[in-house]
Image: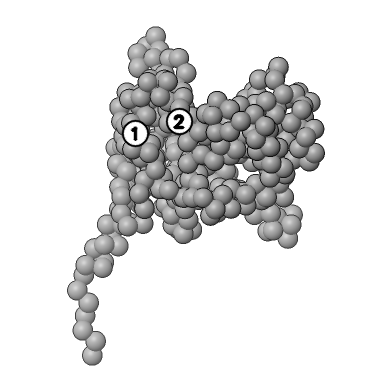
Amino acid sequence: MSALLSVTGLSVSAQTPAGSMPIVQAVSLAIGRGEAVAIVGESGSGKSVLMSALLQLLPAGLSQDAGSIDFRGQRLDQLRESELCKLRGRHLALVPQEPKSAWNPVLTLGAQVQESLLLHKLCDRREAKERALSWLEKVGLPQPSRIFAAYPHEVSGGMLQRALLAAALATEPDLLIADEPTAAMDRSTEHALLSLLAAEQQRRGLSLLLVSHDLVRVASMADRTYVLYAGEVVEEASREGLRNARHPYTRALLASRPDPARLRGDPTLSRRLAVLPGSPPRFERLPGGCRFAPRCGERFERCLDHPPLASDTAGAVRCHAASALNQEADADEAQPKEASA
């Protein structure tokens, strides 16, 4: 599968009075055409900064220090702003995390949903309105005409989030970056919208980058998942590989979220869920060695050294304990088998 988006060794830092502070360090990832990829991690893991870097929209005070971002055969980090504007909204679309702050309060939702269609000259004003109304209906908004004419303050946060998805999909982009796309929605609406995205993948090969703090919510849809902790990728795994997650942080994220079906069958389950102690470290005070070690119940002496991201046929993991287990398994397989009697 050819890569639509390829990120290699991406590092981003913040400039502070004390000097340069690393936020994202040596992140590499790839998304193929028609592929769904997830990036997960707790708040404070660097997900939002990574997304801003991919879109070349880093806020003031942050800068890309190293690495490359290749999209559709072009180096995004080397393009002029005028060239980037031709890609954003047309070939590369974003559904931001905060729906209420993403809209211009003095323009109607309809004017903003059709804005990219007109800006990129994909159709005339009449057809742009028709497409906007069609997409507002596809994302499950009742009375699309009323929503089209409404101002952002006149509809709920969940409706605003669905309208953001409509605006992003209206131009039929090659890659959709969705930052917590269903966070403000109930389960039935979430299922409907994820089904819509899956249908768009099948219909025209849409590529998806799903960003979430909820590993279980996005992992079922993603072909591959990157787990981010303190600005580093600590595990990369396929959908099947997550069933046997190797990094303690990944396993903790999986264990800390209840299964609704099990919860209904056992009301006491919510009191017995695994709890991950502490919180991700602050970027100005990153621990030496393994960054997850202060919260890890499996740490040992070797964790005082910073672990590399070790790749194999199952994916990649940044963990000394997991690497040691892999080496033991490889050694066992390499041992000659005794001949049977």
**Residue at 43% in and 54% down:** 238
Q: Quadrant of the C terminus?
A: bottom left
- Give residue 47's position: percent from left, percent from top: 48, 33
Closer to the camera in the image, 204 or 316: 204
- Left or right for 328, reference 292: left
Asked whether the viewer can see residue 166, the reply is yes
First in residue order: circle 2 vs circle 1: 1
- Give residue 180's position: percent from left, percent from top: 59, 37
Closer to the camera in the image, 114 or 265: 114
**Residue at 68% in and 58% down:** 262
**Residue at 49% in and 50% down:** 205
- Other residues around mark 1 within 10 Å, as few (<14) / some (14–19) / many (≥20): few
Closer to the camera in the image, 60 or 76: 76
Q: Residue 87 — which label? A: 2
In the rendered image, the vertical position of residue 320 relative to residue 67, given as above or below = below
- Other residues around mark 2 within 10 Å, as few (<14) / some (14–19) / many (≥20): some
Most distant residue in the bottom direction: 341
The image's colour scheme reads one colour
**Residue at 55% in and 25% down:** 119
- The residue singled out by tag 1 in the image is 74
Question: Which amino acid does the dot numbered 1 rest on?
Answer: Gln
CB within 8 Å, label 2 to label 1: yes
In the rendered image, the vertical position of residue 32 relative to residue 114, given as above or below = below
Where disc 2 sits, the SS reads helix
